[in-house]
Image (spheres, helix red, strand yellow):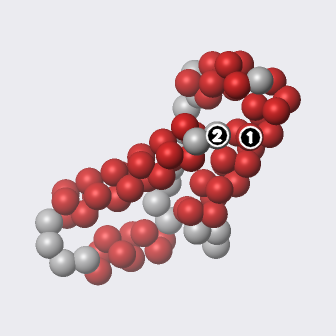
């Protein structure tokens, strides 16, 4: 299994490569028209089922973490 953090590092590498080949503007244009699917794997669901407290709070935190990580990676490229 490849952790989400590693997958996002791979994605960042692809974005960097695209930028080198096509330029920043063209890459940004393509990415803003793209659809991205993030699927929580079994480890994420185990964490979800084992966490005490509010389900919506946990899921909201998970989404916020993914958003933050992706935004930082894409904007810093």
The quadrant of the image that shows the C terminus is top right
Q: Is residue 30 visible?
A: no
Q: Position of residue 61 (x, y in %)?
A: 29, 58
Residue at horizontal 81%, vertical 24%?
22
**22 shown above or below 69:** above
- Labelled pair 2, 1 in contact (Cβ < 8 Å): yes
Residue designated by label 2: 77
Q: Is residue 48 left or right of residue 5?
A: left
Q: Position of residue 19 (x, y in %)?
A: 76, 31
Q: Is residue 36 left or right of residue 57?
A: right
The quadrant of the image that shows the N terminus is bottom right
Residue nearest the viewer, comparing 61 with 35: 61
Query: Badge 1 local density, few (<14 within 10 Å), some, or many (20+)?
Result: some
Rendered image: mark on residue 16:
1
Query: Badge 2 local density, few (<14 within 10 Å), some, or many (20+)?
Result: few
Q: Is residue 72 visible?
A: yes
Q: Position of residue 76 (x, y in %)?
A: 58, 42
Q: Earlier in the sequence, mark 2 or mark 1?
A: 1
Cα separation between marks 2 and 1: 6 Å
Residue nearest the viewer, comparing 64 with 35: 64
Q: Position of residue 71 (x, y in %)?
A: 48, 42
């Amino acid at each position: 299994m490849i952790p989400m953090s590693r997958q996002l590092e791979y994605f960042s590498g692809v974005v960097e490569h695209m930028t080198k080949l096509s330029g920043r503007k063209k890459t940004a244009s393509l990415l803003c028209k793209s659809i991205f699917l993030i699927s929580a794997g079994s480890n994420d669901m185990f964490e979800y089922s084992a966490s005490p407290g509010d389900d919506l709070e946990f899921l909201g935190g998970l989404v916020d973490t993914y958003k933050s990580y992706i935004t930082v990676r894409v904007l810093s490229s």
